Image (cartoon, rainbow, N blue to C red):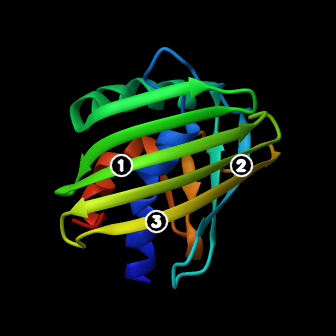
Amino acid sequence: MRRSLRFSISLLPLLLFCAAPASADVQLPLRKAGLWDIKVDHDGAKMPAVTIQQCTSEAVDREFTSEFAPSARQNCSKTDVRKTATGYVMDSVCTMAGATVTSHAETSGDFNSAYTVNVTSRSEGGRFGTRDSKITMAATWTGPCKEGQRPGDVVMPGGFKMNMRDLEKFKSMAPK
């Protein structure tokens, strides 16, 4: 369970980056307010795909845009976002947990009913040395948030629930 929790929390920066508008001149559209099922599949990984539920609103997406932008400027030497005929392409070089992570992400979809993000990345340095990864995130809008949920709530595998607005509380649980 603890390994699954750490894995799930480690996905949050990726979710924030892919779900929120970019900090560059090109802005990704905001997602439709409500509940999103986000299936995260690590190609070639030993771990099976996981589905995360996220309750969002326009205000939460905008809030995380403004909070992500300073972090990107501080931790990333490159953050390029381009609009394409089929969606968006994002390239970044960032330093996280002592590793340099070079990522290429392609995003498509309407952000009202579904969107997909395909990310290829290479991590060098840090605790795990050099690693390549390919992650696909397929998000589907499922309707209004469930009773008792508030915008920013994320339900991780195993039922662990947290609110992204409380992310500071969970940083100590993330892999170092």
Q: Nearer the viewer, residue 41 or 149?
A: 41
Residue at the spot x=29%, y=26% of the render? 70
The residue to which callout 3 is attached is 133
Percent position (x, y) of residue 38? Answer: 67, 56
* Left or right, residue 164 beside residue 155: left
**Which residue sits furthest top?**
25
In terms of image quadrants, where is residue 78? top left
For the N terminus, which image quadrant?
Answer: bottom left
Q: Residues within 10 Å of mark 2 (few under 14, many from 20)?
A: many
Q: CA distance from mark 3 to mark 1?
A: 10 Å
Tell me the kind of residue under disc 1: Thr
Residue 8 placed where, x, y %?
A: 47, 66
Question: In the figure, residue 75 lies in which quadrant?
Answer: top left
Residue annotated with mark 1: 102
Can you say whether 85 is above or below 136 in the image? above
Going by the numbered disc 2, the residue's amino acid type is Trp
Residue under circle 2?
Answer: 36
Q: Earlier in the sequence, mark 2 or mark 3?
A: 2
Q: Is residue 147 visible?
A: no
Neighbourhood count class around disc 1 (C-alpha, 10 Å): few under 14, some 14–19, many 20 upward: some
Q: Secondary structure at mark 3?
A: strand
